[in-house]
Structures are given as structure tokens and as C-alpha cells.
Amino acid sequence: MARVEPEAFEDQELIRVFMAGTLRDALRAEEVLTERGVNYVVEVEPYGRTLLGSPRNGAAFYVADGQAQYCGAQLVDAGLGRGVLIE
């Protein structure tokens, strides 16, 4: 399983579980979720601002509601706890 389009979850609620502020974190999150057999959606979303006030974007990772807790725990175990958005 791997990255899919949002339409793959048309009958399920999606939960945002992770926000990657760097390409390195986004690639690692993709690796972790893919290795664990999780289907996920990635969307570019505003993440904050730079020191000069320019908008900064990050990669938001969404999974099916029933997998949110599992995915959050797996991402924390992989050292990505800073970007995990669920408890």
C-alpha cells in the first residue's frame, strides 16, 4: 500500500496525522507509512511563514480514521514525533 489519491477514501473520513516541514521528513514519513502497508494521501498546505514573512508550505499526511492512532504511533517510533498531529 502507498500514497493514493483522495478519491480512494471516498466513503471514509480522513484524519490529518502528520505535517512535514521539510522534504526529508516528508520522504521519511512516506517510507514509514508505505513499509507499514498504510494507504495515505499527501497534500501541500500552509505551514507557517519564513523570517521574511513569505508563506511556507509543508506536506500534510492524511489516513483513514481507523488507522490514525496506529500511524501516529508508528511515526513517533520512527523519530518523527515532532510532526505528529494526533495523540
Image (cartoon, rainbow, N blue to C red):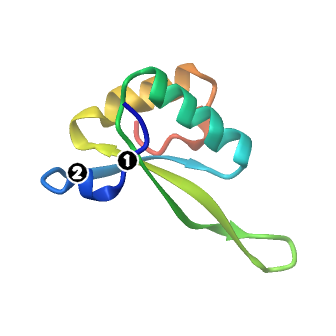
Q: CA distance from mark 1 to mark 2?
A: 9 Å
Relative placement, left or right, of 60 versus 23 is left
Q: Based on the displayed image, in which of its 4 quarters is residue 48 positioned?
A: bottom right
Tell me the quarter of the image containing the N terminus: top left
Tell me the quarter of the image containing the C terminus: top left
Mark 2 surroundings: few (<14), some (14-19) or many (≥20) residues within 10 A: some
Reading the image, the residue beneath label 2 is: 9
Q: Is residue 31 above or below residue 85?
A: above
Task: Give the mark, 1 or 2, whose residue is nearer the N terminus.
Answer: 1
Q: Position of residue 68 (x, y in %)?
A: 32, 37
Mark 1 surroundings: few (<14), some (14-19) or many (≥20) residues within 10 A: some
Q: Based on the displayed image, in which of its 4 quarters is residue 55 positioned?
A: bottom right
Residue type at mark 2 is: Phe
Q: Which SS class for mark 1?
A: loop
Q: Is residue 56 above or below residue 60?
A: below
- The answer to the question of whether label 1 and label 2 lie on touching residues, with beta carbons closer than 8 A, is yes
Relative placement, left or right, of 17 versus 81 is left
Residue type at mark 1 is: Val
Instruction: Residue at 28%, 52% (x, y): give it.
Output: 14
Reading the image, the residue beneath label 1 is: 4
Q: Is residue 32 above or below residue 3?
A: above
Q: Position of residue 41 (x, y in %)?
A: 40, 50
Instruction: Residue at 54%, 19% (x, y): give it.
Output: 77
Instruction: Residue at 43%, 32% (x, y): give it.
Output: 72
Instruction: Residue at 62%, 43% (x, y): give it.
Output: 26
Q: Which SS class for mark 2?
A: helix
Q: Position of residue 67 (x, y in %)?
A: 28, 33
Disc count in the image?
2
Q: Is residue 85 above or below residue 6?
A: above
Q: Position of residue 85 (x, y in %)?
A: 47, 45
Q: As rendered, which of 79 and 38 lies closer to the eye?
A: 38
Query: Viewer-nearest of labels 1 and 2?
Result: 1
